[in-house]
Amino acid sequence: MSSERQLSVSISYGDVKVDFSGSPDVVMRSLHEFVAKVVPNIDLARTITVNYSLNDIIQTFKDFIRITPEGPRVWLQDRKVSDKDVILLQLVASRASSLSGKFTSDSMNIGEIQAATGLYPKTISSRLSELTKLGQVEREDSEGGGKYRITTVGVHRLSDQLSKKLRQGQAAAVGAEGSP
């Protein structure tokens, strides 16, 4: 009685891990199919995947947020930004503190946002309503009322908005240096 020997192969491609086992012919066909069909689809999917990691958030917003002993804070240093952007920055700071393990939740209620930013509660409520309608913030119902967290769309929009402001500020500074 002759038993066919089994071949086992493990492949890792990025964060995808696949195991093949069986006869050498079956494993080779499966391996070839994986490389020919699945790997290009994984790469294609990565081109349209948006997910802001802690590192992405820190690199993008390092000039605007800080995690302090008192909690996540907006750090503007004389920069002028809209109330909406202040709220979004506060929620980004909250997300960063949650991802870093400093705080357990990335959502905040209106009172917490008010305490951290100094904005009036009515202003916060109105801006949060607008941001929720735009899909940049989502409301979570909780025991003490509603809590809000920034969405991926909100992080992306805020990143674009602030990078435009920084470029405009740099262009204005260069223009001021060249004037007599």
Image (cartoon, helix red, strand yellow):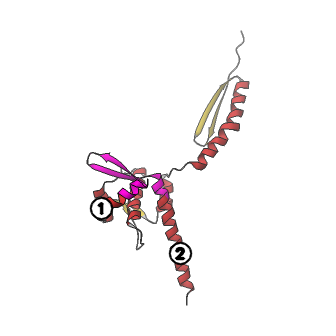
Q: Which mark is residue 170?
A: 2
> Which quadrant of the figure contains the N terminus?
top right
Residue at the location (33% across, 53% down)? Answer: 108
Q: Check residue 134 for magenta coloring.
A: yes
Residue at the location (70% across, 20% down)? Answer: 5
Q: Are circles 1 and 2 on residues that touch, CB within 8 Å? A: no
The front one of 177 and 6 is 177
Q: Residue furthest right?
A: 25
Q: Amino acid at mark 2?
A: Gln
Q: Residue furthest top?
A: 1
Q: Which mark is residue 114?
A: 1
| Label whose residue precedes the other's in the sequence (1 or 2) | 1
Q: Pointer 2: residues within 10 angstroms few (<14), some, or many (20+)?
A: few
Circle 2 — which element?
helix
Circle 1 — which element?
helix
Q: Check residue 154 for magenta coloring.
A: yes
The front one of 108 and 6 is 108
Residue 180 at x, y percent in the picture: 55, 90
Q: Amino acid at mark 1?
A: Gln
